[in-house]
C-alpha cells in the first residue's frame, strides 16, 4: 500500500547531525533502505526540519523497520497515512460510485 509519511526532526537532533556531517548521509541511507518513491523536504509548521516521504508498505509489520531509523538517527516524529496517486484514484471510481448509490441520498 502506498503510504505518505510526514517527518519532523527536532532542531537539536538535526543540528547535531548536520554538525557531525551525518544528516544527508543518514537520510540517504534510510530513504534507500525503505525504497522511497519520492521524498520532499521542508520546514514543519512549528519550524523544525521536516519532510514528506512516499513509499510502499507491503505489510504493517514493516512499520518498525521504516520508523526506527528516523527515531534513532534524528529523534524524529512521524505520521503515516495511506495515500493514492491519480491512477489509484481512477481505480477507486467503482467503489466511490457504489458508495454514492448506497449512501449518497440527501434528505
Image (tube, rainbow, N blue to C red):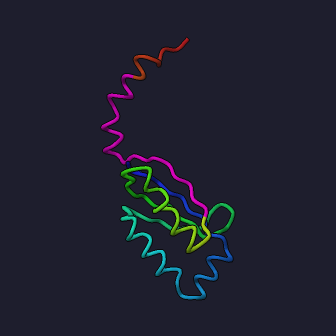
Q: State which quadrant residue 98 falls in.
A: top left
**Residue 80 part of the magenta segment:** yes
Q: Which residues are magenta?
A: 77-98
Whether residue 106 is situated above or below residue 37 in the rendered picture: above
Residue 90, percent from left and from top: 32, 38
Whether residue 2 is situated above or below residue 77 in the rendered picture: above
In the displayed structure image, the side of residue 97 where residue 46 appears, left or right: right
Residue 57, percent from left and from top: 39, 53
Looking at the rendered image, the quarter that the C terminus falls into is top right
**Residue 88 part of the magenta segment:** yes
Q: State which quadrant residue 96 falls in.
A: top left
Residue in the picture at 49% in, 80% down: 24
User: Extreme top residue here?
Assistant: 107
User: Extreme front residue here?
Assistant: 61
In the displayed structure image, the side of residue 37 where residue 19 appears, left or right: right
Residue in the picture at 68% in, 77% down: 12
State the residue in front, 59 or 77: 59
Residue 54, percent from left and from top: 42, 58
- What is the total number of numbered labels drawn onto the structure image? 0
Residue 56, percent from left and from top: 37, 55
Residue in the picture at 50% in, 61% down: 52
Amino acid at each position: 500500500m502506498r503510504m505518505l509519511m510526514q517527518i519532523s526532526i527536532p532542531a537539536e537532533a538535526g543540528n547535531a547531525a548536520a554538525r557531525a556531517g551525518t544528516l544527508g548521509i543518514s537520510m540517504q541511507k534510510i530513504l534507500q533502505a525503505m525504497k522511497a518513491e519520492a521524498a520532499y523536504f521542508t520546514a514543519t509548521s512549528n519550524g523544525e526540519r521536516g519532510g514528506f516521504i512516499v513509499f510502499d508498505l507491503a505489510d504493517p509489520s514493516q512499520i518498525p523497520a521504516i520508523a526506527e531509523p528516523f527515531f534513532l538517527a534524528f529523534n524524529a516524529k512521524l505520521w503515516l497515512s495511506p495515500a493514492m496517486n491519480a491512477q489509484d484514484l481512477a481505480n477507486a471510481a467503482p467503489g466511490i460510485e457504489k458508495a454514492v448509490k448506497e449512501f449518497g441520498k440527501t434528505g
